[in-house]
Amino acid sequence: MFPFSYTTVPDVDAAVRAGRSGGRYIAGGTTLVDLMRETVERPDTLVDISALPLTGITSIPGGGLRLGALARMADVAADPAVRDAYPVVAQALELSASPQLRNMATIGGNIMQRTRCSYFRDVSAACNKRAPGSGCAAQEGYNRAHAILGTSDACVATHPSDLAVALAALDARVHTRGPDGDRTVPFADFHLLPGATPDREQDLRPGELIVAVEVPPHPRPLASGYLKVRDRQSYEFALTSAAVALHVQGGVIRAAGVAAGGVGTVPWRLRAVEQHLVGRRPADGLWAAAAERAAEGARPLAHNGFKVDLLRRTVERQLRIVGGGS
């Protein structure tokens, strides 16, 4: 680990000033500290924001929820309002990491976590995300766990967050405060496709601090849930996952939010699947037909072609679980 300085801040505005001066924010530290030990991350200054009053979980008019950026994953997963209104969020959190990590990790940190690509975490390997211009060892390396959607010649790393997949399906919004004031970023725009600049991962400006994530109101009733497919049943990242939220009224699907994890360079919204669902009646055949569109645009690599079919089957199964049917 490289030397660094450490400071605490009394309030959000002081944190923003410290961030604008080059400090890196740290709260739970469950990803950043690991990366610092591996010398992947080498910040000069850590700004401890863990004492800031950003832990609230509050209702917003119309039925949505505002999750403080420093709310712990375990607390959000256990919150009655979250479990009642958005079970997809609670399930995604409970299928993430380990109980010990969920007790420490925060909502803001979760959506900011960096990829688990082994080449990114190996400082001897070429990685455009870690060292721009150095290349991408995963392209010709062992890429079983890598992305099939949203990739570029510069990067094929997956986004690792389960929570972010659920938030993508729910059209969440990210609230920030920065040197230029408060800002709200639609979740669909928050994570950036790698393109030629995979080192730039989020739409955050210098010094900006995430203060909350908002799940907006949705029409009721809303059925939702999260399914994660992985090599083992605990403490493992997704090979594929699916977050589904369906509003069914009068026997017809009026609105649908569907997103996938483990397959995209960012949490991947499945618009073609949603479009096939809306306006139709739930039926066994509908789930399969919609799921056929889940992998549109996929570009599998040498070792992860299995994800194309696995993604379709994961989405179909979760549509059936949430929407009903045998």
Image: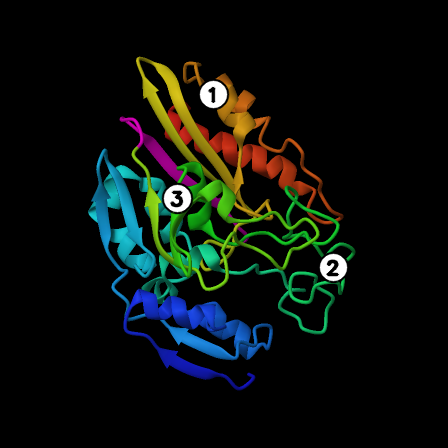
Residue 145 painted magenta: no
Q: Which residue is mark 3?
A: 173
Residue 225 painted magenta: yes
Instruction: Find residue 121 and name its label.
Output: none
Q: Residue furthest front?
A: 180
- The percent position of residue 69, horizontal first and vertical second, equals 34, 57
Q: Is residue 217 above or below residue 19?
A: above
Q: Is residue 208 above or below residue 313?
A: below
Q: Which of the two discs, 2 and 1, sits closer to the camera?
A: 2
Residue closer to the observer: 261 or 171: 171
**Element on which disc 1 rests:** helix
Q: Which residue is mark 1?
A: 277
Mark 2 vs mark 3, CA separation in Å = 31 Å
Q: Is residue 93 above or below residue 120?
A: above
| Quarter of the view holding residue 154 | bottom right
Taking the spot 42% from the left edge, 61% from the top edge, the residue there is 179
Which region shows up in magenta?
Answer: 218-231
Q: Residue furthest right?
A: 140
Taking the spot 62% from the left edge, 33% from the top edge, the residue there is 295
Taking the spot 63% from the left edge, 53% from the top edge, the residue there is 145
Mark 2 vs mark 1, CA separation in Å = 37 Å
- For the residue marked with disc 1, what is the amino acid? Leu
Q: Which residue is mark 2?
A: 136
Q: Residues within 10 Å of mark 1 (few under 14, many from 20)?
A: many
Q: Earlier in the sequence, mark 2 or mark 3?
A: 2
Q: Residues within 10 Å of mark 3 (few under 14, many from 20)?
A: many
Residue closer to the observer: 61 or 67: 61
Mark 3 vs mark 1, CA separation in Å = 24 Å
Residue closer to the observer: 47 or 160: 47
- For the residue marked with disc 3, what is the amino acid? Arg
| Quarter of the view holding residue 325 | top left
